[in-house]
Amino acid sequence: MAEPLAVTVTVNGAPYERSVEPRLLLSDFLRHGIGLTGTHVGCEHGVCGACTVLLDGEAVRSCLMFAVQADGHEVATVEGLAPEEGELHPLQEAFREVHGLQCGFCTPGFLMTLVPFLRDNPAPTEHEIREAISGNLCRCTGYQNIVEAVRLAAERMAAT
Amino acid sequence: MTRRYVGERVARNEDRRLLTGRAMFVDDVQLPGMLHVAFLRSDHAHALLRGVDVSAALERPGVVAVFTADDLGDYWQPGPLLVPPPPVEGIVFHEATQVPLAKDKVRHVGEPVAMVVAESRYVAEDALADIVVDYEPLDAVVDLEAALAPDAPLVHERFGTNMAAFVAQRHGDYDRARAAADMVISRRFLYDRGAAAAMENRVVAAQWDPLAEDLTVWDTTQAPIPIRNGLARMLGLMESQVRVVAPFVGGGFGPKIMMFYPEEVLVPWAAMRLGRPVKWTEDRQENFFATSQERGQVHDAEMALTRDGRILGVRDFFLHDCGAYDPYGLTIPINSQCTLLGPYDVPHYYSEFRAVFTNKTIVTPVRGAGRQHGVFVMERLLDIAARELGLDPVEIRRRNYLSPELFPHNFDILYQDFAPLYYDSGNYLPALETATEMIGYEGFREEQRRLREEGRYVGVGVVSYIEGTGIGPYEGARVTVDPSGRVRVATGLGTQGQGHYTAFAQIVAEALDVDVERVSVVTGDTREFGWGTGTFASRGAVVAGSACHAAAVAVRGKILAMAARVLGAAEEQIDLADGRVSVRGIPERFMTLGELARHANPLRGAVKPGTEPGLEATAYFGPDHGSTASGVHAMIVEVDPETAMVEILRYVVVHDCGRLINPQLVEGQVQGGVAHGIGNSFYEKLHFDESGQLLNASFMDYLLPTAMDVPRVEMAHMETPAPMNPLGLKGVGEAGAIPAGAAFAQAVEDALSGYGLEITEIPLSPSQLFELLQVARAASPQIQETAG
Amino acid sequence: MIVEGEYTFSGPRDVVWELLQDPEVLSKAMPGAARLALVGDGAYEGSIRVGVGPVTAAEWKLAVTLQDRDPPAHYVMQVDSKGPIGFTRGSASVDLAETDGGCTLMRYRADLQVGGKVAGIGQRLIDQVAKMMTHRGLDALSNELRARLAEEA
């Protein structure tokens, strides 16, 4: 087994220093290494998108990355999405309002995929929304209400 | 003012936790000293197990224990039979339930052979490679018909056959109907296997507390109470010593009600034996081999009709694939058998099936649970009959519906709950008329012709279905007014995203006239509520919802009685509104529910004989019969005959699940079910080769529908209340998935009318459709695609 | 899965036959740093490192048995391999014929069964990998033949 390596990762604004095995996945580091269990793992081969987090602001699949690759980078997870305790991000608010989630397991991955998407496409068409989430699988909702939620969130975010 | 919640679009109580990453799923359980498990699984579909050498694995640093079947001693037992065979005359049933770890023989790829417990999952997986297994491969049983050949290899030698069951049921006299018929249609229909593919895989974690002498098990199960009961029995504990928690569960769809999976038996046992908490998390690959699947059936069916398209009778012989073991009894094929009759008046019916053991993963219910097979066969027979008779497919359905005055309606065959197949209520024609109107059926034919001239191939499909839902035995609920004024509801169900936290809160909030956000619901924790069965057969809202209602009504009675005493007025004079009680006409004589709850639990004085402390009640609901939901699905597709790609242009669902608790939740269930059904129709098929190897065990090769594939479902609700329960509820969890395949087949066939192709197989992948098109072209060389 | 084809060796048939029985040479023909040792008449055992697409390269145990030997024209090779993520079983029928110019034409037809995890995740690639390994192996044999003939010359 390879020697542990030291990594320093900033997650949701807070620095974490840990000594990890080189083969430790970023998803396992986040969930079990630092206890941020909001990021979920659905397939471990990069298809389902449930484990999506932001690395320096861009969506990545944390099951396809090693923790050591995040050394010196900034990671954002669903736990850091709401602006304040008790408040919700406009995307979260919209998902709740239009029933964009059922079991909620895939939801953190959808949210983290959508944050950079709406940043870069503040007024997306339905087709663009569907394309943006086509790399995230959901078995419960049939996607329709997720699409609605994104539209609603985009409208509200544009208005503010 | 009385609050109305039942029937309203209330946003979900559970969503804040889920959206902020604070909802606890089982894999989030992380305890000090926790050990992690990996399973060595069979690479062979069928082989004798000559020996398992774990010595090298035990030497690997970080490995704490490795167990094989021999290490389990008396704890090694085949699992329970969950559903005994129904009391049908002449039934044959061979019981062979799964075992915790294979002994002597493996019967499907992925069957667990050894269990490694280590300090980390990574080490546990490393150690799997250290284990040496000596297999002697046997020929595998894969094809259903070949399985019943006299010289077929045997999955379970002791039965001398691969036939797991034989059931024949009849209603009327089909032979007489056939003799009187103007026309008989007969065809063979296939329905193949798919995966349930909940986004969360299965997880089991367990901790034994030697001081309290109790065991806590976290499990992604749909049925925590039966899991607790079974574990207590197996481990020699009292039920009260075992607590099973199914916290937030990431989708169920049926396989999470299978019990006992080997992992569910072994993880708690290992935690007790090793004295440390133990967790196993299934990975997606394991899920494809080790979590139950559904849908392999072959039907040889025929329908006898009059020349004006009235059904005289239906006969169906079918084979059902149960995989390597049959712990779930005959629920699926019985559902197929019963659901085939659909909303139609079928005077004569004969159906017999053989369930067949194969060297494949176990088959247990997956969303729909055999119902879609029945619907597919019936709807396809009607389509073919309509074509042969020159009738419109909608018209032939219209002519055969059970009319409203025939309810309640009884068929003389037994359903999955062992009660006669009983339709409590229904009104089918209005749903059909609404659906055809919504999809624009009348004008569609002309549009179709016009588009065909442009070289575009569009088609419409309109199908009906019924679903027996909300069956017994029972569920319970406890409703408590807390001194804080909040109301707590506990039920024994597990919940997997259906919105029970909100639906039950709505029922209770309305009965007690409190704010719905002040009602908190707990489900899936046996220590909170220990009586009940589980979430299956689209029964959660119906059965547990009715129990919540009954408990809330009882609490309401206690509130009024207590308020009358405390406020010094007659019960009839007490108003209950907005979380407080007051004396009618004297609003200043009031008390909040929280204050009243404190009064109901006094520190001095006496609780009067015949009364109880607290504002709390527990109630149970157990229906004699299920309630029959129904609906119509209509879809328009466009097919490209060159590439065989199908695009769904529109999808309409008109459905009737009785009274709606929350239309938004119902619509979510239907939309999701349709997506599942579309996947089953077009994308999802598990490919097994002739040696029983699964060839597409990843999301790279097994394709779930994405947001690009699933259309917006346009919906209308009909509400024919169920007479069987006080709220008039019927179930809806599985409905969306059931008729999608039948609608898809009709629509694709219609789009390709003129090709003379017939769709008798689901799933129908683009490549299979391409082949059908090739065959059709070869048979009719005159077919020429219109230039686009 | 069936893998079949033809391959021409630039050398006489009896030399090719000899090469095909030599564990040293066979080891070189197995890509992935194989070890192979003769453990009995026509029976070899060893190991091989191979990866398939997304499946990490891992050590597979290998057993090869030669049957129906009709030197120098025909034999059947039974190959069983076992790795941490599955197994393969199969047999390959090999025919050697002399052709013009002192060359040898090999015709082979292998029927291979792949099982376990690797069947489930590598399916799209297994065909390609099997063909690639076959071609590389035959090229390696051809090089070996050239070297041996050069030595003799």
Image (cartoon, coloured by chain):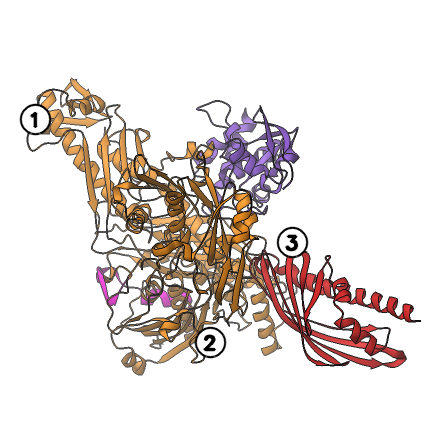
Chain colours: A purple, B orange, C red
Distance in Å between CA atoms under marks 3 and 2? 37 Å
Whether residue B491 is situated above or below residue B264 in the rendered picture? above
The image's mark for residue C58 is 3
Residue C80: % across, % down? 62, 67
Same chain for the residues at labels 3 and 1, yes or no?
A: no
Whether residue B197 is situated above or below residue B206 in the rendered picture? below
Apparent side of residue B60 relative to residue B12 in the rendered image (left or right): right
User: Is C13 within the magenta?
Assistant: no
Secondary structure state at the residue bearing disc 2: helix
Q: Amino acid at mark 3?
A: Ala
**Quadrant of residue B238 within the rendered picture:** top left
Q: Amino acid at mark 1?
A: Ala
State which region is magenta.
B391-415
Apparent side of residue B372 relative to residue C10 in the rendered image (left or right): left
The image's mark for residue B570 is 1
Q: Residues within 10 Å of mark 3 (few under 14, many from 20)?
A: some
Judging depth in this view, the residue of B221 and B104 nearest the camera is B104
Residue B608: % across, % down? 7, 28
Judging depth in this view, the residue of B112 and B424 nearest the camera is B112
Mark 3 or 1, closer to the camera? 3
Q: Residue at x 44, y 68 (%)?
A: B358
Chain ID of residue with mark 1? B
The answer to whether any part of residue B451 appears in the image is no
Distance in Å between CA atoms under marks 3 and 1? 81 Å
Residue, disc 2: B146
Same chain for the residues at labels 1 and 2, yes or no?
A: yes
User: Is B411 within the magenta?
Assistant: yes
- Quadrant of the rendering where the C terminus of chain B is positioned: bottom right
Residue B116: % across, % down? 49, 49
Q: Residue at x 53, y 27 (%)?
A: A80
Q: Residues within 10 Å of mark 1 (few under 14, many from 20)?
A: some
Disc 3 + disc 2, Cβ < 8 Å: no
